[in-house]
Image (spheres, rainbow, N blue to C red):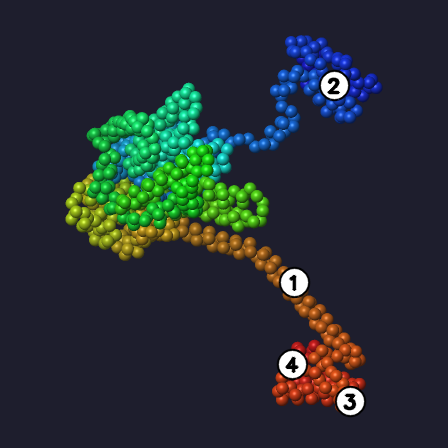
């Protein structure tokens, strides 16, 4: 046991409670108000430094429970300062029941986790630029020019800024270093290198989502429900789920744009009345706010310049906003804005030019070449030409999906709604400018022939902010109230969420997934055929060869093949660079040449034509010293194509050693007829062909076993249904018999009453006269047959009043013209 000096404070409190309760149960009267309660030496010594004050009167001990009385007694003995600072028990319980406010850091971390899951679930192909404008140059920057990265014509002609690939090159270097430190196997290293850019882009997407919410808080206020409506629109957007975690330059551009919009000095674009109200502050406060405003402006302009370097079309957003500021402000503000634009723009441009000099090896200015090649030479038309109304009829519906009606309503309101107060005017002013931006950018881009929905992606956060108010007005009453009046709205909201989830999952997991899955198959085959000596260094040694007979850039390249020892080629689609108008009119790229005439292309562009095709794969045959002539493709170990091309290749290569060794689902439908169907792989290895046949046979047997198991599982249900059906049949027969018996009894009773003369049927109501009986039957017609029937009834029924011969006549007449079943009712 512990000594007395080592007792805890809880032990002392327990002893005090016991002594107090024992004194409470004694017969001594309670102390008067004038007398002070006794205190121990410890308590008196502890309270010697505090302010002395008279203790309040204790409540009657008989009216309170002992424990509660003791708590109030101890509360009254504590100093006043402590009583005032410590919350009461009711207050603590109320605070524990109230939900805690969600902090911005919690929102940000939740968005990062959400986008990481999103990025890892994206397994489909969207645009070639996702890989060839970011990851392929980054791969070359990180690992060298001899690692097999595909540098497209834009990089050879210096059309792109190297800032975007530089980001992912750093990510690749960190991932490779981590794999080296952890001594990962080649397979795990490949998986890490594939997942690393996705992880980085997920963080970028989460930053964009967070600043969209933060920008909404700046517009609507911290406590507004519209902020959460904006966040819900962002998180539940199918386009955001489908596109935001892809390594497109448009995704980084969108994130940078929304961060810059949050930093933009919206105070400069206010009306004169609001400016005067804000100038009424004190000089020190106004000076401090002006410094903060200037710092935010510089940060905003640096980010805007970076976005314009990545995508020159982003300048449309800032030209619109700067034009509003210049129009509404004095010459002093205009000079400040022009000065900061020049300083920040020059700084970012200098950094970009220096980085491009190191990347390309020559001094170049990619934004100028981007505009020159795409607008002056119209090379963008080579990749597609769209109608002028594309962004209205297709772009915005794809970007917004189910939020389109709310966005259109928000755009209309923001452009036409008059302000009702100063605070609302402040919010409406920002929304009006966002509406101008959302209208100006698609309108100007519609003048360019080549259009894509991702070109207007940077305005999506602004559209979500404008959509929040109509969305909240429509669905918040249905969510916050339990009235049945709002049931249709609740069902509509549930339907919208289901549609969004379906679109998001289908487009990121199933649609166009075959072009990603086939590269996983090729990596597996490379690991399978790599000798143990080269297992730890997959970049060297013999590998496999692959050819893609597909439209150009249908699959990712080295960023997903990973291994440089996978020797691959694919059909190209280089545009007619530096050709005159007549040459451009007759120019046909390699992919189009193949699909126009596959037979001629294979004869003229494949090494050996259609007659000299290898019988064994390269990893099973002796290496050849023969060089491949320029412009020719070697017959590969693995030939990859879409199922649409399968009948043609079966006809052309039926005498070769090629056979199917892999097939994976790609699309159920596609707007390009060349990309329809599964992705099929043919190989030269007979062992792999036989293994694939075995796999298909096992799949078929497994499917049959599942069907059998399904039938076996259904047998108890079938037996139960049959048992219930038999029981139901017996019940119906019993009910029918009972009804038949009841009907017979009722008819028998009616016959007895009629025979006894107590009751006469309604249709035979009669009036007796002295001459006989006269029937009153006006509803019958005057046909001869009915008259004869009435006469028979008169004679048979009333010639002998005491008898009931009309029933015998009815039985006779019914038995002559009735079936057996009807006759039994009267027998």
Q: Which residue is mark 3?
A: 770
> Within 10 Å of the Cα at label 1, are there few (<14), some (14-19), or many (20+) other Cα atoms?
few
Q: Are marks 2 and 1 in contact (CB under 8 Å)?
A: no
Q: Name which residue lies at 62% across and 87% down.
A: 783
- Tell me the tag on residue 471: none
Under tag 3, what secondary structure?
A: loop
Q: Is residue 726 visible?
A: yes
- Disc 1 or disc 3, which is closer to the eye? 3
Q: Which residue is mark 2?
A: 57
Report x, y in % for residue 709: 52, 53
Real-space CA distance between mark 4 and mark 3, rounded to the nearest whole angstrom = 25 Å
Real-space CA distance between mark 1 and mark 3, rounded to the nearest whole angstrom = 63 Å
Q: Which sits in the foreground, 613 or 54?
A: 54
Question: Vertically, is 421 above or below 675?
Answer: above
Q: Name which residue lies at 66% across and 66% down.
A: 732
**Chain-order first, disc 2 or disc 1:** 2
**Chain-order first, disc 4 or disc 1:** 1
**Chain-order first, disc 1 or disc 3:** 1
Q: How many marks?
A: 4
Q: Are marks 1 and 3 in contact (CB under 8 Å)?
A: no
Question: Vertically, is 95 above or below 767?
Answer: above
Location of residue 482 by image quarter: top right
Under tag 4, what secondary structure?
A: loop
Report x, y in % for residue 691: 38, 48
């Amino acid at each position: 046991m512990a000594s007395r000096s080592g007792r805890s404070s809880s032990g002392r409190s327990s002893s005090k409670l016991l002594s107090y309760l024992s004194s409470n149960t004694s017969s001594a009267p309670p102390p008067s108000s004038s007398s002070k309660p006794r205190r121990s030496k410890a308590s008196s010594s502890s309270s010697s430094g505090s302010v002395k004050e008279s203790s309040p009167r204790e409540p009657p001990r008989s009216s309170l429970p002992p424990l509660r009385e003791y708590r109030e007694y101890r509360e009254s003995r504590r100093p006043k300062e402590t009583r005032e600072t410590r919350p009461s028990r009711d207050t603590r319980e109320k605070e524990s029941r109230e939900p805690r406010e969600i902090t911005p850091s919690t929102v940000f971390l939740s968005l990062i986790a959400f986008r990481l899951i999103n990025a890892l679930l994206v397994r489909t192909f969207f645009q070639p630029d996702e890989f060839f404008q970011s990851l392929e140059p980054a791969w070359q920057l990180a690992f060298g020019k001899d690692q097999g990265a595909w540098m497209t014509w834009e990089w050879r002609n210096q059309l792109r800024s190297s800032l975007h690939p530089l980001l992912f090159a750093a990510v690749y270097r960190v991932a490779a270093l981590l794999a080296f430190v952890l001594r990962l196997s080649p397979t795990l290293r490949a998986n890490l290198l594939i997942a690393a850019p996705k992880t980085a882009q997920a963080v970028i997407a989460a930053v964009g989502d967070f600043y969209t919410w933060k920008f909404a808080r700046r517009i609507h206020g911290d406590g507004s429900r519209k902020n959460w409506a904006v966040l819900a629109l962002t998180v539940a957007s199918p386009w955001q789920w489908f596109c935001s975690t892809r390594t497109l330059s448009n995704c980084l551009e969108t994130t940078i744009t929304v961060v810059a919009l949050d930093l933009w000095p919206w105070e400069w674009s206010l009306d004169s009345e609001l400016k005067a109200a804000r100038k009424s502050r004190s000089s020190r406060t106004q000076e401090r706010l002006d410094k903060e405003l200037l710092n935010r402006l510089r940060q905003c302009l640096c980010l805007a310049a970076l976005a314009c370097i990545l995508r020159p079309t982003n300048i449309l957003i800032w030209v619109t906003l700067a034009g509003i500021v210049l129009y509404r402000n004095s010459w002093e503000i205009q000079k400040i804005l022009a000065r900061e634009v020049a300083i920040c723009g020059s700084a970012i441009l200098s950094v970009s030019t220096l980085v491009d000099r190191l990347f390309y090896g020559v001094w170049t200015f990619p934004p100028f070449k981007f505009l020159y090649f795409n607008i002056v030479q119209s090379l963008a038309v080579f990749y597609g030409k769209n109608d002028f109304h594309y962004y209205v009829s297709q772009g915005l519906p794809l970007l917004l999906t189910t939020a389109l009606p709310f966005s259109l309503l928000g755009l209309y309101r923001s452009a036409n709604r008059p302000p009702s107060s100063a605070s609302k005017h402040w919010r409406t002013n920002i929304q009006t400018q966002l509406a101008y931006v959302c209208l100006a950018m698609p309108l100007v881009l519609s003048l360019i022939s080549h259009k894509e929905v991702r070109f207007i992606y940077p305005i999506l956060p602004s559209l979500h902010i404008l959509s929040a108010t109509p969305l909240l007005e429509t669905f918040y009453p249905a969510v916050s109230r339990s009235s049945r009046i709002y049931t249709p709205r609740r069902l509509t909201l549930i339907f919208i969420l289901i549609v969004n989830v379906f679109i998001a999952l289908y487009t990121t997991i199933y649609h166009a997934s075959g072009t990603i899955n086939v590269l996983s198959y090729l990596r597996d085959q490379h690991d399978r055929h790599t000798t143990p000596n080269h297992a730890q260094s997959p970049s060297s040694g013999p590998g496999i060869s692959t050819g893609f007979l597909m439209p150009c850039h249908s699959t990712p390249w080295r960023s997903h093949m990973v291994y440089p020892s996978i020797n691959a080629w694919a059909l190209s689609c280089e545009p007619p660079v530096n050709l005159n108008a007549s040459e451009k009119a007759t120019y046909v790229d390699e992919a189009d040449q193949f699909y126009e005439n596959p037979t001629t292309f294979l004869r003229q562009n494949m090494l050996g034509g259609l007659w000299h095709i290898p019988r064994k794969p390269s990893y099973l045959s002796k290496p050849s010293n023969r060089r491949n002539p320029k412009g020719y493709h070697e017959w590969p170990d693995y030939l990859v194509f879409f199922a649409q091309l399968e009948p043609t290749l079966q006809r052309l290569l039926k005498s070769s050693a090629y056979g199917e060794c892999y097939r994976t689902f790609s699309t159920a439908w596609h707007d390009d007829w060349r990309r329809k169907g599964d992705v099929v792989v043919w190989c030269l290895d007979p062992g792999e062909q036989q293994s694939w046949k075995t796999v298909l046979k096992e799949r078929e047997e497994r499917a049959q076993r599942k069907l059998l198991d399904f039938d076996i599982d259904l047998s108890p249900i079938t037996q139960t249904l049959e048992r219930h059906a038999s029981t139901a049949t017996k019940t119906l027969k019993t009910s029918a018999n009972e009804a038949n018996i009841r009907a017979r009894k009722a008819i028998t009773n009616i016959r007895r009453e009629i025979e006894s003369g107590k009751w006469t049927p309604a249709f035979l109501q009669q009036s007796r006269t002295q001459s006989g009986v006269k029937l009153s039957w006006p509803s019958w017609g005057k046909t001869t047959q009915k008259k004869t029937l009435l006469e028979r009834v008169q004679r048979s029924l009333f010639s002998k009043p005491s008898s009931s011969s009309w029933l015998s006549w009815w039985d006779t007449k019914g038995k002559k013209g009735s079936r057996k079943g009807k006759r039994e009712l009267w027998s």
